[in-house]
Amino acid sequence: MISQPRRHCTVELQALPSRIGQVRRIVSAQLRHWRLDALTDRAALGVTELLTNVHRHARPDKICTVDIELLLYRLTVSVRDHDPRLPRVHDAEPYQTCGRGLAMIAAMCENWGARAQGDAGKIVWFTLPVPGTAPLTATLPVYGAATTGPFTGSTDLMVPVDLAPGPGPLNGRAGTRSFVLG
């Protein structure tokens, strides 16, 4: 069995311009703490775009939660708000000053998406690959086959080069931090 180290940070806030800057700084500091400096600019830009969408479009309120999760070789940043309407990528005209946020996220990340949460709202997320990770090469039994051999199929198992946990547990749970911006 492969143990999957997990690190998690949650920030609850009202998506106002001043709070968005604070969340950028929290995301940057958290990634530096996890020794993922190479992801800082893209993660901060992506979370800014998602929070700006909440600020501009979310109804009935601007309250949201940002989750940053590091799981082995992938950083996932998600924003949950109370508006059930899913975002759409628009083809912005060259003269338009907005409407490119999701297209920019799609261009800079490994993957992104939106998940409806019924009347509770939605979650919009993106993932970034952790630098210095390589696919796991394994010899696995193939069920129903007489032989075993190197696994060459698609796999999500990756092995990080250096993801040693930071010092001590955070908030009583190892690898978890929570913030509330009031």
Image: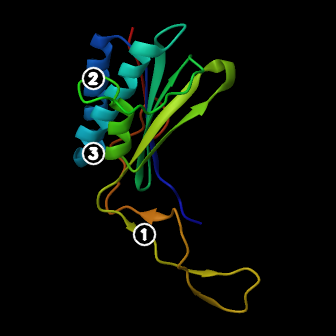
Q: Earlier in the sequence, mark 2 or mark 1?
A: 2
Quadrant containing the N terminus in the rendered view? bottom right
Q: Is residue 74 above or below residue 113?
A: below
Secondary structure category for the residue under label 2: loop
Q: Residues within 10 Å of mark 1 (few under 14, many from 20)?
A: few
The amino acid type, in three-letter code, at marker 2 is: Gln
Q: Please identify, in this view, whether the residue under mark 3 or under mark 2 is nearer the observer.
A: 2
Q: How many marks?
A: 3
Q: Residues within 10 Å of mark 2 (few under 14, many from 20)?
A: few
Q: Is residue 12 left or right of residue 84?
A: left
Q: Earlier in the sequence, mark 3 or mark 2?
A: 3
Quadrant containing the C terminus in the rendered view? top left
Place of residue 100 in the rendered image (x, y in percent of width and height, measured from the top left): 33, 30
**Residue beneath disc 1:** 135
Secondary structure category for the residue under label 1: strand
**Residue beneath disc 2:** 96
Place of residue 92 in the rendered image (x, y in percent of width and height, measured from the top left): 33, 29
Q: Is residue 158 above or below residue 119?
A: below
Q: Is residue 156 above or below residue 36?
A: below
Secondary structure category for the residue under label 3: helix
